[in-house]
Image (cartoon, rainbow, N blue to C red):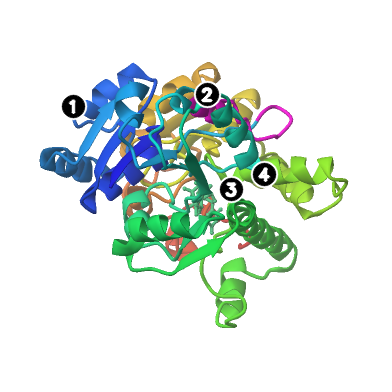
Amino acid sequence: MKITVIGTGFVGVVSAAVYASFGHTVVGLDIDEKKVASLIKGKVPFYEPGLEELLLEQQATGNLSFTTSYATAVANADIVIIAVGTPSTPEGKANLSYLYAATKSLSKYLKEGAIVVVKSTVPPGTLSGVDEILAKTATVGYELASVPEFLKEGTAVYDTLNPDRVVIGATKKHVFEILSELHRPLNTTVIKVSPESAQMAKYAANAYLATRITFINQIADLCEHNGSDVQEVITAIGPDKRVGGHYWYPGFGYGGSCFPKDVKELAYYSRTVGEGHNLFNKINELNSERIDRLLLNYAEKIGGWKGKHVAVLGLSFKPNTDDMREAPSTKVIPWLAENKATIVGFDPKAGDAAKTVVADSGLKVVTSIKEAVKDADVIIALIEWDEIVAFDYGATKLDKKQFFIDARNQFNPSIITKWGYEYLGVGRE
Ligand code: UGA
């Protein structure tokens, strides 16, 4: 098949490369000339393990190319996949302007019978907006579908090649058939539903996971009051198959480009339909205030942040990415700066990005953990990069009182204590 993927962010580039690897002819399109120039040279403009290798491989086969031209990309495409961002507006609503702009731009080049697939995360009902725009300009017949994406950053290539399911939202039999055929090499369950259900399922999946994280964070907060250890609690509840032992790491709250925005959209939508007192508004509120709460709580335990040398380890929003969207560091660092701490930061990949994102906070970014911790009164292991978890903090212990904040409960408290640090986790002593 001839496929065009519009938008070359995580979802777009990974999808384009994976569909190319199935033997289809894929064109990736973006209006950002710099991004496209970089992709044409085989360089992915962000860090995602395994993606550059796949990209180069598929470019070499001739199956994958990139362009900024709608005319070139859309005119021959059997399937046009829209994978542009839908960031939050200040009121929490999903901003659909990129989606609609892309729809407008592609509309005049569509070939007869092409399927326009919305992969971006969009509120249920959005396809009618897309249809309206297409109908104004398109001179041919076309079909519409919604195929949400469930990949995670940091494991995006693996997730796309090994999905738990593919969800196809459409209304016509032949559209289901063509899109099922497109995903056949994945050898996974294909779930066929209406476009609205597919879109709602995407929000439901992300909101459920965000709720699960918020729930365990709340349990962790209670553990602090009674000497129980949230990690032991997780071990004790996980074997119940209805609960499960995975995706349960307490910490500084969820971040990234998806959970915060999708919960906000669901909360906003709930308010607009008169359901504003539901869970999603509360989850959003609890997650938004979490970092302040924790830092205030630690302030009591460490004798205040003022004048402390703090090493913040892990600046991206999660391991194996340089993405800093809604990263805990973007709240922690300005908060510490405001509270008169001196901050040194380290990240295996996001150091340069951090310099711009938290530019005003006086953050000094260094290139090794050793350098980051060399004067530290407090070490905050904020993100669980392998390198940060595996580091020998015993070898760098200073001859002074030092606190070790294990923000993702990744360390063995007794080892950290044995090395001479005062250990502070989340929901554990
Ligand atoms: C998330 C979903 O997991 C994907 O299924 C979805 O496709 C994607 O959003 C999206 O909508 O595009 P992602 O944001 O890449 O993927 O990352 P996750 O690994 O799910 O982590 C999200 C946030 O939750 C991170 O801040 C992470 O630190 C936090 N988290 C995750 C926890 O606090 N505890 C956990 O147990 C797991």
Q: Nearer the viewer, mark 2 or mark 3?
A: 2
- Residue farthest along the bottom direction in this orientation: 240
Viewer-side residue, 51 vs 57: 57
Viewer-side residue, 303 vs 99: 99
Residue denoted by label 3: 254
Residue denoted by label 4: 125
**Identity of the amino acid at label 2?**
Thr
Residue 137 numbered tag = 2
- Please report the residue visible at 45 percent of the width from the left and 24 percent of the height from the top: 108
Q: Nearer the viewer, mark 2 or mark 4?
A: 2
Q: Position of residue 364 (x, y in %)?
A: 43, 23
Q: CA distance from mark 1 to mark 3?
A: 34 Å
Q: Earlier in the sequence, mark 1 or mark 3?
A: 1
Q: Earlier in the sequence, mark 2 or mark 3?
A: 2
Residue 424, compared with residue 189, is above or below; it is: above
10 Å crowding of disc 1: few (<14), some (14-19), many (20+): few
- Residue farthest along the left direction in this orientation: 60
Helix, strand or loop status at disc 1: loop
**Identity of the amino acid at label 1?**
Lys
Q: CA distance from mark 2 to mark 1?
A: 34 Å
Q: Position of residue 424 (x, y in %)?
A: 57, 54
Residue 96 belongs to the span the image colors magenta:
yes
Res. 403 visible in picture = no
Q: Earlier in the sequence, mark 3 or mark 4?
A: 4
Residue denoted by label 1: 41
Q: Earlier in the sequence, mark 2 or mark 1?
A: 1
Q: CA distance from mark 1 to mark 4?
A: 38 Å
Occupied quadrant, residue 239: bottom right
